[in-house]
Amino acid sequence: MTAGSRGDVAPYTGLGAGLARSGHEVTLATHGLFEPLSAGSGVRFHATPVDPYAVLHSDHGRDLHASTTGLGKLLRAVAMATSAAEEMTDSLVRAARGADVVLAAGAVAPLGRAIADGLKLPSLGLFLQPQHPTREFGAPMLGGRSLGIVGNHLGGLAVVTAVDRVFTRAVRRLRTRHGMALRGAAAGRRTHERARWPVLHGFSELVVPRPGDWRPGLEIAGYWWPYDTRALPGELEDFLAAGPAPVFVGLGSATVPDPERISREIVRALRAAGLRGVIQQGWAGLAARDDDVITVGDVPHAPLFPRMAAVVHHAGAGTTAAVLRAGVPTVPVPVQFDAGFWAARLVQLGTAPCAVPLRRLTADALAPALRRAVSDPAHRDRAQALAGRLAEEDGVAPVLVALDRLAS
């Protein structure tokens, strides 16, 4: 079970395909919009309500940009996600009936745990971001900025409390509509924490080392690479062949207040840095076209990113993983929530010269960052070395072990 944007879904297509190859029957339950992502993977698909594209482009979704702090954005997101969680509840119950185990993404963990409890099923958390409080770094969903050991822990607790609020009505619906004998979302979480509910995280310890103050049962598995066998479009292949390696610029599932202005600033930055560009339209609606720039729609990252001089992206967990896998330098443009956390990691790892937050994105800010990313060989060297080590990891294997443990 998962919910959210494409980056909250795609990694589970690869994980599901790996589990299916090992003999498991896997169903991916998420928004119907993403059904094509699992095609050919051997993973069944169960469509749930809510169109995240429509939600993010609604008045409530656009209001996220009105908040300038991580806490303000989180509070607005809680209000927006509460009704969506309740709307998905009945469909997720139908998906879980007859299953042997519930695998719950971090985006729906409280609801997934509650459904599993109500149906007397074992469950396992599969998280793409660190969500448990720690003193070692700031809460990723608040942007990741460190507030000191006490502030970091309190910030993490604040996020956990906010997530409980998102699912309060949904858990109540499980009791009233489905007759499940359950505690509230917060009480259920505390019970599971005391029981050391197992959670595996779909990123590498090379990128985020496991915090030393995490409880037992919270483990890092390694990346789950999306299942995607598509080739690049012919027009894009022609553009790549027509000149030197370009820069990819895309904001994924993030939205922006003024896509036309952002598009102009991106093109100005590319030209000031003397670089060609592949601009992905994405959910932000970016667009530009000329001899040195091409706009593309949904294209696979795995065959494209290694051919780029650099990648400019919104620093979502999924795109960050794809950039690290490709071994290319990057300039993160964090938009909101955990993007600031991943952007800071890329800078710390040395694969990015700096971050350029969306609210400060201008040609004058982006162009020098691009020059540094492309001209300083240290960034590419570090990126390629890290990509080589990531290629040796197997993020599916720990999940298989955890499933065997649940069945024993």
Image: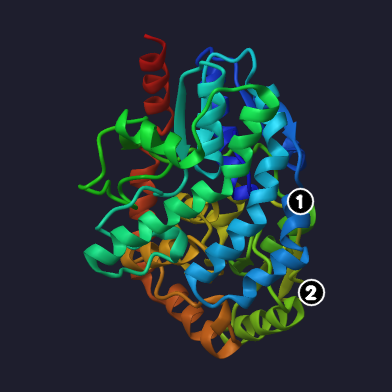
**Res 227 visible:** no
Reply above or below: 105 against 336: above
Residue ID at (42%, 59%): 140
State the residue in front, 348 or 155. 155
Residue ID at (63%, 65%): 251
Question: Which residue is disc 1 drawn over?
Answer: 233
* Secondary structure state at the residue bearing disc 2: loop
Residue flagged by tag 1: what amino acid is it?
A: Pro
The quadrant the C terminus occupies is top left
Residue 180 in picture, x, y percent from top left: 59, 22
Residue ID at (38%, 22%): 402
Distance CA(mark 2)–CA(mark 1): 16 Å
The part of the image, by quadrant, that contains residue 25 is top right
Residue 210 falls left or right of residue 70: left
Residue ID at (66%, 86%): 268
Question: Which residue is disc 2 drawn over?
Answer: 289
The residue at the far bottom in this view is 364
Residue 78 falls left or right of residue 137: right
**Res 340 visible:** yes
Q: Which mark is residue 64?
A: none
Residue 127 falls left or right of residue 14: left
The part of the image, by quadrant, that contains residue 346 is bottom left
